[in-house]
Image (spheres, rainbow, N blue to C red):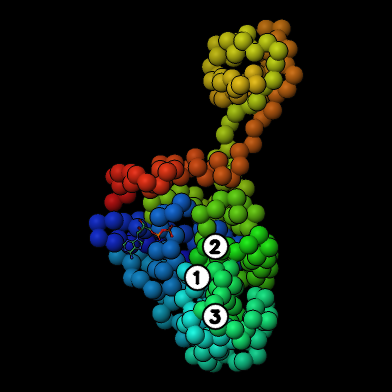
Amino acid sequence: MIEAVNLTKRYGDKTAVADLSFTVEPGKVTGFLGPNGAGKSTTMRLLLGLDRPHGGDATIDGRHYRDLPQPLRKVGALLEAKAVHSGRSAYNHLLCLAQTQGIGKKRVEEVLRLVGLHDVARKRAGGFSLGMGQRLGLAAALLGDPAVLILDEPVNGLDPEGIVWIRTLMKDLAAEGRTVFVSSHLMNEMAVTAEHLIVIGRGRLIADCSTEEFIERGRKQTVLVRTPDAERLTKALAREGATVTRDADGELSVADMDAARIGEIAAAGGLVLHEVVQQRGSLEEAFMQLTRESVEYGAAGAEPKSQGGAE
Ligand code: ADP
């Protein structure tokens, strides 16, 4: 189990992680979701003892990472891709790592096979693509057969086949009872990978709930209505407190009112309805809605917004 308690980290006057508390349970994939700059990497670095917090505490099974006697056997981590000595082969890179922790050659062969790099294991890792670098990083994380995995944006650089592969691998690892904590800024990827979500924005906790609940919470409460009496229905619904917008095709999008009430109002006015559909929000929409206030940069990515409130 991973536990963060009131974690706080500042860089100068910028607060990267603000009073963040959560736990990550074993047996399921937990997604760590947030827009770029939200503080995901910083949090993971704090969990791994690569940075010291200004406040709070981060532990893995009740211990600080730095106090683990053989950390690779307890925690496997994948941080930024391609931190590999360029001249070394994938095999030698893993072997060096393994030897520091008393892990044998057999396990090196095993993880190379597991991540699909067996055939290129003797090639220079420096010549690897980003996707192959990710696979090598994952092999390193898995070397010690750890109970806890901390993976920062592992999908980056992978092709579609690689994405499906890593998704399956993470689920399998969790199903074996491991703790799998994986960050991403890609909501839809997390929707199909993670069972539980910890969502942050500007270093602060936005949601800590099941993926299903997250989608439910952010669902836009609108109802799509198709009717030949659009004008009259719009007026009738608006009179009863609904917010109605009409799109180019003449369809109505009705907010602040449920489908049953819309049907009743239409019936009372003798208005014909062809279709009434409750709209389901995607995880993407839920995410945008819940993080809107905390996104650091606008959609264009150019204009930094005010940092007020984060400090
Ligand atoms: P994420 O992983 O969610 O994209 P990060 O943890 O990388 O977010 O960054 C959180 C915030 O902290 C960002 O505003 C980033 O610019 C800032 N930050 C991260 N690392 C440093 C650093 N070493 N020095 C200064 N600022 C940093």
Instruction: Pick whichever of labels 3 and 1 is earlier in the sequence.
Output: 1
Disc with the residue nearer the chain's start (2 vs 1): 1
SS category of the residue bearing label 2: loop
Q: CA distance from mark 2 to mark 1?
A: 8 Å
Mark linked to residue 156 = 2
Dot 3 or dot 2: first in sequence order is 3
For the residues labelled 2 and 1, say whether their Cβ atoms are less than 8 Å apart: yes
Label 3 and label 2: CA atoms lie apart by 17 Å
Q: Which residue is mark 3?
A: 125
Circles 3 and 2: CB atoms closer than 8 Å: no
Whether tag 3 and tag 1 are in contact, CB under 8 A, the answer is no
Task: Give the residue type at disc 3.
Answer: Ala
Question: What residue is at 60 percent from the left and 50 percent from the top?
Answer: 188
Out of 249 and 147, give the one closest to the viewer.
249
Which residue does the numbered mark 1 point to in the structure image?
81
Q: As displayed, is residue 257 above or below residue 93?
A: above
Q: Amino acid at mark 2?
A: Asn
Residue drawn at (60%, 13%), measured in percent from left and top? 234
Residue 210 at x, y percent in the picture: 59, 52
Residue 108 x/y as whole percent? 62, 86
| Three-letter amino acid code of the residue under disc 1 | Ala
Q: Position of residue 297 (x, y in %)?
A: 39, 46
Residue 263 in sight from this viewpoint: yes
